[in-house]
Amino acid sequence: RKEVEQDPGPFNVPEGATVAFNCTYSNSASQSFFWYRQDCRKEPKLLMSVYSSGNEDGRFTAQLNRASQYISLLIRDSKLSDSATYLCVVRRDDKIIFGKGTRLHILP
Amino acid sequence: DAMVIQNPRYQVTQFGKPVTLSCSQTLNHNVMYWYQQKSSQAPKLLFHYYDKDFNNEADTPDNFQSRRPNTSFCFLDIRSPGLGDAAMYLCATSRGRVSGANVLTFGAGSRLTVL
């Protein structure tokens, strides 16, 4: 079992809709959690850190559930520019582990 | 302003011909990482430096070596590239241990093609 698992998608979602992804991690000792966005053939860029209390940045909301060992990302009022791959990232000590990513296509 | 700079952006080499990829950073971050990312796969950590301390991942092939001559620069050497080494190589930095406040910053990547 991989340490960080995501549904690879693709998620095809009409513009303006709300979309949510989950990510599960297997090691309960994991300490920090992030969502990164990666556009085709580009480097990953930080979207947001994820905290137990949940956090929101504009149209994006991230949640961490330590008991169930999953992280979620919610995108409201999706835009065409949100089309990308969303990578779940987990830190355990000095290891930083990436999920394979979830591909999102926003349809006009 | 680019803060993590990778060169070259694109590298074409022949099977078995050594390649060096470079990464420089203006962030004065302690930690530098090298990741390998193949198409539709997660970035895979090859190794990282915490200051001068080198940390190799157990499954990183011996064909891959790294040097960090100073805080700002880090190099990835591929001694004898095979066809399976064709990938995007990503350099990343962080200030100390990655946490909610200290995040990974990536360079734009070096895309390696092996003929």
Image (cartoon, coloured by chain):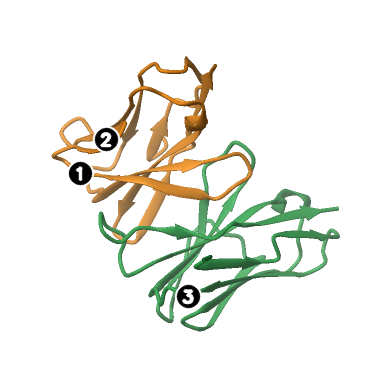
Do residues under tags 2 and 3 come within 8 Å of each other at their CB atoms? no
Residue A76, x across and y down, in percent: 33, 24
Element type where label 3 sits in the image: loop
Separation (CA) of disc 1 from disc 3: 28 Å
Separation (CA) of disc 2 from disc 3: 30 Å
Taking the spot 20% from the left edge, 44% from the top edge, the residue there is A51
Q: Which chain is orange?
A: A
**Is residue A10 shown to the viewer in this render?**
no
Q: Chain of mark 1?
A: A
Indicate which disc residue A62 carries: 2
Give the vertical position of B51 relative to A107 (above or below): below
Q: Residues within 10 Å of mark 3 (few under 14, many from 20)?
A: few
Q: Is residue A49 left or right of residue A85?
A: left
Q: Which chain is green?
A: B
* Residue occupied by mark 1: A51
Q: Residues within 10 Å of mark 2 (few under 14, many from 20)?
A: many
Taking the spot 38% from the left edge, 54% from the top edge, the residue there is A96
Do residues under tags 1 and 3 come within 8 Å of each other at their CB atoms? no
- Answer yes or no: are tags 1 and 3 on the same subunit: no
Q: Amino acid at mark 1?
A: Tyr
Taking the spot 63% from the left edge, 44% from the top edge, the residue there is A41
Element type where label 1 sits in the image: loop
Q: Is residue B75 left or right of residue A59?
A: right
Give the vertical position of B58 relative to B43 (above or below): below
Indicate which disc residue B46 carries: none
**Is residue A90 shown to the viewer in this render?**
yes
Splitting the image into 4 quarters, where does residue A57 fall? top left
Indicate which disc residue B26 carries: 3
Residue B8, x across and y down, in percent: 71, 65
